[in-house]
Image: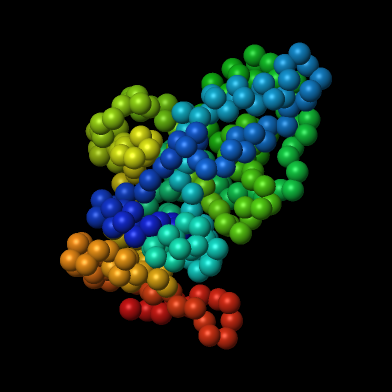
Amino acid sequence: MMLYKYVSFNSAIIMLNKLSLGFTGLEDLNDPFECTNFGFSNAGSITPANAVRIFKQHFSRKYAVSSLTRNPLNSLMWSHYGDSHRGVVVGIDADECGLTLDKEFIIPAQLGEIIYVGTKNKNLNGVPSEKHLNELRSTMTFNPEIRNYLKQAFLYKSLEWGYEEEVRVIKSLSDFKFSYHDTDDKLLTKDGKWNIVRNKYLGQPLFCYKIPQSGIKEIYLGANVYRNAARIEEGKNKQAVEDNIEFIKSFGCNVFKCEPDVSTWDLMPVEL
């Protein structure tokens, strides 16, 4: 199962050097509608708005999300998540990297395809109650056969986001010992499979999952990737950018440069 991660050029270099895939806490995602599609009834004493607020607070620091996609040649994705075509797309074999393991992930890759809808669920989960909260606290496995809150929280998005063709992998953070507001990086598991690093500018934690180099099968350079070097001040890190491009080209997998097709609006991969 091949999935793709759109990242900036600098993030790609870090990802490839450290062989890790980043997971972001729910509250740090960019869509304010995340975790609001529970479909509670308004027939009870607790309003749907208050119930959603409580449920979202519960989820916000208990789960982390890695967003991937099925298409490495999506022009909009390159513009929005690939640093205006100056970035990189990393092609990952989800099976080889362990992203399909239900023992590791509460929602593994094969169950994480986003459902894009025009309207939110209505009256799906009944009147919110203490029973609902108890179910949330005890639900640690994802069963696609039953109605469950994890699916409502993480796998529904508005139709406007449909161009992303997103597939999510969700990690429960319940077994990790950390403080959300710590400033230090740290290992989260003794085997080194998970660690936490901090965004120096935003202070947000990034949960990093170790993946094997053999699980990275393809790398795509954006159509404007060489402008990374051109926009660096003369004599300042320009050579480092060019060296990093050479590092990517020699990584040990198929490497492509995305080029705009002259006769269509498609991006064409040119193998380097």
Protein image colouring: rainbow
Q: Which of 91 and 182 is in front in this view?
A: 182
Residue 46 position, x and y percent, is: 72, 16
Residue 82 point in image, percent of width and height: 44, 60
Name the residue at 48% across, 53% down. 68
Residue lying at 49% horizontally and 49% vertically, measured from the top left: 67
Which quadrant of the structure image shows residue 195? top left
The number of numbered badges drawn on the structure is: 0
Image quadrant where residue 5 sits: bottom left
Nearest the viewer among 114 and 139 is: 114
Residue 21, image x and y in percent?
Answer: 36, 49
Residue at the far front in the pictured view: 234
Q: Residue at x 52, y 47 (%)?
A: 168
Reply above or below: 93 against 115: below
Q: Would you say residue 248 is visible in this rendering?
A: no
The quarter of the rendered structure image containing the C terminus is bottom left
Query: For this view, does 44 lie left or right of residue 134?
Result: right
- Residue 240 is left or right of residue 20, and the answer is left
Q: Is residue 10 visible?
A: yes
Q: What residue occupies the far bottom of the structure in this picture? A: 263
The residue at the point 35 percent across, 26 percent down is: 181
Q: In this view, does 260 lie above or below 189?
A: below
- Toward the right, the furthest residue is 43
- Classify 181 as above or below 21: above
Note whether 146 is above or below 5 in the view shown: above
Tell which of 154 and 100 is nearer to you: 154
Q: Where is residue 73 in the image (x, y as percent from the top left)?
A: 50, 69
